Amino acid sequence: MMTMPDADRAAMTAPLLPRPAYLTASLSSSSFASFNSSSSSSSTTSTTTSSSPSPHAFPPHAMPQPQGPCKALAVLRDHAGSVSSLSLCGEFLLSASTGGDIVAWQQPDLRRFARFGHGENGGSVKALAAAGGRVFSAHQDGRVRVWRVSRRSRSENAFKLVAALPTARDYLGRVFRQASYVQTRRNHRRLWIEHADSISCLAVHDAVLYSGSWDRTLKVWRIADLKCLESIRAHDDAVNAVAADAGVVYSASADGRVKAWEKGKAAHFLQGVLVARDGVSWNALAVSAADRRVYAAGSDGHVAGWDRLGGRTAARWSLACDVKAHDMAVLSLCVVRDLLCTGSADKTIGLWRRQSGGELAKVGVVGGHEGPVKCIQASWCRLSNGCMVYSGSLDKTIRVWWVPGALQDGNDHQEQQQEKSFKDQNQNQNEKASLFLR
């Protein structure tokens, strides 16, 4: 068991590396121009090289203002195993793999900055989460590892392992108490603060870390001292996804249910079951920060969304949309503003926009991966009016896409232009026929 020195514990209260102002545009004009002629399904083969210009060389007014369809920008290849999770951490994009390693990619040029975690024996990394001055990684061995992000080090030591959950202090404080043990399966007992199987998902909310596991439980960890506060027997099958917003924690499971949990005075309690669909595994969750809509991705290719109604004490959820998003299972989701991105086992990414009536409208499909899209992240670029989309796949690659904010408007404009061109052609033909008759 690892102990966390007081110095490390104090350092973890420091804020995360701030996201530089230039990353609100995050894309150099030269790198964008190099992919300007590629289609949404084009396949690039290399990342930005070390000769890329410094991002500081481009003032905000020089940043690109694309209005066309989404662009493929880069393919990142540095994992020996399948890419299992992505997370945005300050100025870094973090990617984890089934090989047990985590790579930090420096934005905006996406150079590899550091690789860490490959020396641990925790097995494959299932999930990542970042908060404050630390990164949390969930592993196949049922433990969460905590990495301190150094604001001073600019080397491989920037990510330092400081703890593994449960901590040695938490473990030793309970190991001799019989009341601290629970039966996980026949003739086998464990401490309730331990996960009995692989941890599949992580979420951070209100200074608390939530971990979901194939052992069917959710565990609640206080970030300040990394103590396990609670273990919730959440589902009848593996917990595949967890998300939190406005004091409510959502869990999705292979048992066909998506549940909402609210934090009470002493413990979390079940506030509602959003859906119970037999024969469907819910694989991913995403919550829209703008309107608190909850999206869930199913193994049947559907994406469902619920709007939260009422206050915290009398909250209820109304099904707002249920669309057939892909022909195969939807494995990953992310939402930024009114754009929802879906990653599927069919190797494509679906782009959806929420309409004024609440329904989802497909505005694009992005192809290029050679394997199922296991994880997806997106970040909004304010100055460029669009977002960067990062997708990780079982093909061991990470692909980077640019999606303009005016994608839908651009499609409408293109259709209007085509219609106008068609009308002009008809008018010209009519004029020629009239002259011929004369």
Image: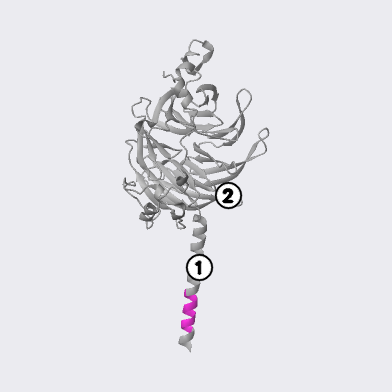
Residue 138: name its quadrant. Answer: top left
The percent position of residue 405, horizontal first and vertical second, equals: 50, 53
In the rendered structure, which amino acid carries the disc numbered 2? Glu
Q: Nearer the viewer, residue 369 or 338?
A: 338
Mark 2 residue element: loop
Q: Is residue 31 left or right of residue 264?
A: left
Q: Earlier in the sequence, mark 1 or mark 2?
A: 2
Residue displayed at 52% across by 45% down: 336
The percent position of residue 139, horizontal first and vertical second, equals: 41, 28
Count of picture labels = 2
Identify the main secondary structure in magenta.
Answer: helix
Instruction: Tell me the crowding category of disc 1: few under 14, some 14 to 19, or many 20 or more residues within 10 angstroms, Cα based.
Output: few
Residue 128: name its quadrant. Answer: top left
Residue identifier under label 1? 419
Q: Is residue 293 left or right of residue 169?
A: right
**Residue 356 visible in the displayed image:** yes
As for residue 426 lying within the magenta part, the answer is yes
Q: Nearer the viewer, residue 34 or 307?
A: 34
Which corner quadrant holds the N terminus?
Answer: top left
The image's mark for residue 119 is none
Q: Nearer the viewer, residue 373 or 21?
A: 21
As for residue 54 lying within the magenta part, the answer is no
The correct choice, above or below, for 56 with respect to 232 in the image is: below
Magenta span covers which residues?
A: 425-433
| Color style of the picture | one colour
Question: Outermost residue toward the bottom?
Answer: 438
Residue identifier under label 2? 359
Residue displayed at 40% across by 41% down: 392
